């Protein structure tokens, strides 16, 4: 049985409680019954899980739906835990190439082939981290939850780094390694994550300088790291590619440059393009005009600040 990192604290707490409690004779569980640990529910994401369009489900979930809709080519393989037994793989996974591919390429199959990787679990985890740590500072309300994310992110980032170390690493591998390193930096896991994120961004944009997601992430990571002037062309390119979150990242960037008029104009443009976000835009405009707070994400975290 594999216990996920986020469950460690709950398990430890339950064991400590059991040690300090007198034994109960009634309703004693059968010693042969299996012990089942239930991982605690994650707190809600702070950032929208689909930065391209806040009204759409996360990209990961959209890919899962596509995978489920595709025909399944069942495959019988040896059980890695018992070579004498066979396993039947009958669920499509998300498969990407690891090398020699400069475009986004996702296929759906029950098993990865040569120079491919089943990226399903990694994408699932990266999506969860994005909901808390896409921007700086990260937004966690539970210390143990954050520690669980930090531990797992180190593992995932190391795995992606190994794949990305190849000169011919695929675009799909590089973009994931880049995102993991940005979030590692945001979680203060060490200066190496900042260095890695810059290197990955340069490699990615050399392959495809117009990729909307790469420009968004490179733009706001530069901005939040103090490179507001350098961030402008990348955020602008992401806005022109209709990436919704590029607008708020651009507002944040203008505030860092103390260009309040540009920040307010960007929010007015945001209202026109995304009328459902009018309340958010108006609240941010009011905050900028009255108090000039410099971080959009902090204002959104604390609505009372603008009252």
Image (cartoon, rainbow, N blue to C red):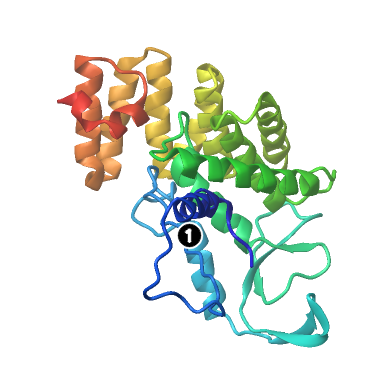
Is residue 147 left or right of 274 when viewed as pictured?
right
Picture coordinates of residue 66, whole percent (x, y): 53, 72
Nearest to the observer: residue 197 or residue 88: 88
Q: Is residue 276 above or below residue 287?
A: below
Would residue 99 be visible to someone looking at this image? Answer: yes
Identify which residue is drawn at 55% across, 58% down. Answer: 124
Q: Is residue 66 above or below residue 49?
A: below
Q: Residue furthest top?
A: 258
Q: Quadrant of the N terminus?
A: bottom right
Disc 1 designates what residue?
39
Give the structural element (helix, strand or loop) at label 1. loop
Would residue 212 be visible to someone looking at this image? Answer: no
Nearest to the observer: residue 227 or residue 211: 227
Nearest to the observer: residue 95 or residue 181: 181
Q: Quadrant of the C terminus?
A: top left
Picture coordinates of residue 64, whole percent (x, y): 53, 69
Q: Residue furthest left?
A: 307
Is residue 92 left or right of 239 when viewed as pictured?
right
Q: Residues within 10 Å of mark 1 (few under 14, many from 20)?
A: some
Is residue 154 left or right of 188 when viewed as pictured?
right
Identify which residue is drawn at 45% across, 29% down. Answer: 137
Count of marks overlaid on the render: 1
Picture coordinates of residue 159, whole percent (x, y): 74, 49
Identify which residue is drawn at 56% across, 53% down. Answer: 125
Nearest to the observer: residue 149 or residue 65: 149
Residue 180 figure quarter: top right
Picture coordinates of residue 140, whole percent (x, y): 42, 38
Identify which residue is drawn at 73% across, 51% down. Answer: 102
Residue 88 figure quarter: bottom right
């Amino acid at each position: 049985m594999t216990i996920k990192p986020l469950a460690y604290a709950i398990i430890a707490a339950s064991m400590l409680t059991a040690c300090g409690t007198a034994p109960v004779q009634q309703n004693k569980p059968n010693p042969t019954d299996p012990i089942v640990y239930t991982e605690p529910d994650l707190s809600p994401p702070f950032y929208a899980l689909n930065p391209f369009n806040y009204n759409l489900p996360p990209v990961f979930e959209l890919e899962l739906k596509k995978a489920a809709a595709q025909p399944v080519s069942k495959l019988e393989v040896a059980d890695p835990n018992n070579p004498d037994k066979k396993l039947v793989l009958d669920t499509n996974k998300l498969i990407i190439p690891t090398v020699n591919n400069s475009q986004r390429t996702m296929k759906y199959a029950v098993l990865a082939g040569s120079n491919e990787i089943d990226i399903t679990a990694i994408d699932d985890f990266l999506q969860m981290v994005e909901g808390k740590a896409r921007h700086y500072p990260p937004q966690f309300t539970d210390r143990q939850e954050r520690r669980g994310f930090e531990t797992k992110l180190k593992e995932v980032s190391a795995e992606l780094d190994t794949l990305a170390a190849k000169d011919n690493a695929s675009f799909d591998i590089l973009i994931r390694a880049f995102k993991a390193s940005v979030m590692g930096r945001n979680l203060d896991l060490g200066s190496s994550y900042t260095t890695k994120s810059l290197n990955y961004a340069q490699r990615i944009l050399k392959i495809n300088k117009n990729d909307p997601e790469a420009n968004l992430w490179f733009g706001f990571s530069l901005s939040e790291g103090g490179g507001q002037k350098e961030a402008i062309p990348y955020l602008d390119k992401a806005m022109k590619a209709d990436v919704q979150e590029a607008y708020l990242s651009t507002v944040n960037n203008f505030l860092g440059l103390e260009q309040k008029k540009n920040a307010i104009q960007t929010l007015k443009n945001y209202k026109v393009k995304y009328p459902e976000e009018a309340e958010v835009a108006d609240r941010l405009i009011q905050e900028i005009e009255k108090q000039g707070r410099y971080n959009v994400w902090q204002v959104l975290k604390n609505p009372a600040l603008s009252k």
